[in-house]
Image: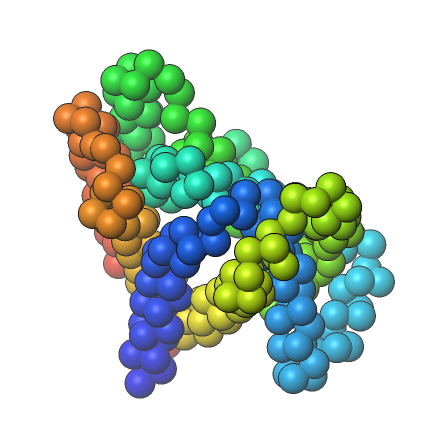
Amino acid sequence: MRSRTGLVLAVCAYAWWGGLPLYLTLLAPTGAAEVIAHRVVWSLVCCLAVVAATGRGRELGSVLTNRRTAGTLAISAALLTVNWLVFVYSIESGQLVDGALGYFINPLVTVALAVVFLHERLRPAQWVALGVAGSAVMVISLAYGRFPWIAVVLSLSWGMYGYVEKGVGRTVSAVTALSVETLWAAPLAVGYVVWLTADGRQTFVGAGPTHSWLLVGVGIATVVPLLLFNGAARRLPLSVLGLTQYLCPVMQFLVAVVVLREPMAPARWVGFAIVWVALAILTADALRAARRVPRIT
């Protein structure tokens, strides 16, 4: 029963993230930077409400007074802000396919980061998967005559965010961590909104009440899947949770191609197919390794 609940929560979280581009398209004509500013502000409001409702105020206070933990979360806040900004830009500029590619290759980037920062030794299949993924990026770059920077920045920023978060994840709850991260980013976000308002370019009021509520809703749309994912992570084995993560980029890819009608030239299909082969190799190897780990009874 616990595993079934965890699976439902994981699917809901990744489906939410996968469908989020549909919501973000409703925010036009608001630019990516203004969307992120409101995302930070209203996410902070939602997080603080959840912290108060769940009695985690003492935990939040202890994190804020711990220089090391607060400093670590400042780094993760910067990485998260970059990730959010580039993702929203990918939708705004009609390049969500590249955004989906970034989240497809993220598991491979995570493996590469483990080698660089944790000095882990890779199994042969993992090296093969990384090599195949690298060739996919080259194919896509050559086909379009430009480096797929959106995909690379998204995968690197999210991979690095996960690496930094790993250092505090065992002692700090997800909602508390996001509260501190948004607190770090809030002064810049509020300052940007004030500057836009003074310059007469803000859209929170000028675009009508419906648009205002949609911008407020970005905070809810950020916090809810995080809570769902946190619940899933506590109930599911890492191997199962890792498999469900592919639902997010698959949905983003379908939204980009089917709903938003972004072009997919044959060379781009080839590049994505190579990435999917790399992910298949990586997944098969991870499942094989998980079966070899003896169960503790």
Question: What colouring method underlies this structural image?
Answer: rainbow
Pinpoint residue 240: horizontal percent, then vertical percent.
31, 63
Pinpoint residue 32: horizontal percent, then vertical percent.
54, 43
The residue located at (76%, 64%) in the rendering is 63
Front position in the image: 170 or 184: 184
The residue located at (74%, 53%) in the rendering is 190
Using residue 3 as the reference point, say whether residue 53 is left or right of it.
right
Using residue 258 as the reference point, say whether residue 29 is left or right of it.
right
Count up the numbered dots: 0
The residue located at (73%, 58%) in the rendering is 183
> Within the image, what quadrant is residue 97 found in?
top left
Pinpoint residue 176: horizontal percent, then vertical percent.
66, 67
Residue 218 in view, yes or no: no
Pinpoint residue 255: horizontal percent, then vertical percent.
27, 50
Image quadrant containing the N terminus: bottom left
Q: Residue furthest left?
A: 266
The residue located at (63%, 59%) in the rendering is 205
> Looking at the image, is 96 positioned above or below residue 56?
above
Using residue 128 as the reference point, say whether residue 111 is left or right of it.
right
Front position in the image: 275 or 153: 153
Image quadrant containing the C terminus: bottom left
Residue 152 in view, yes or no: yes
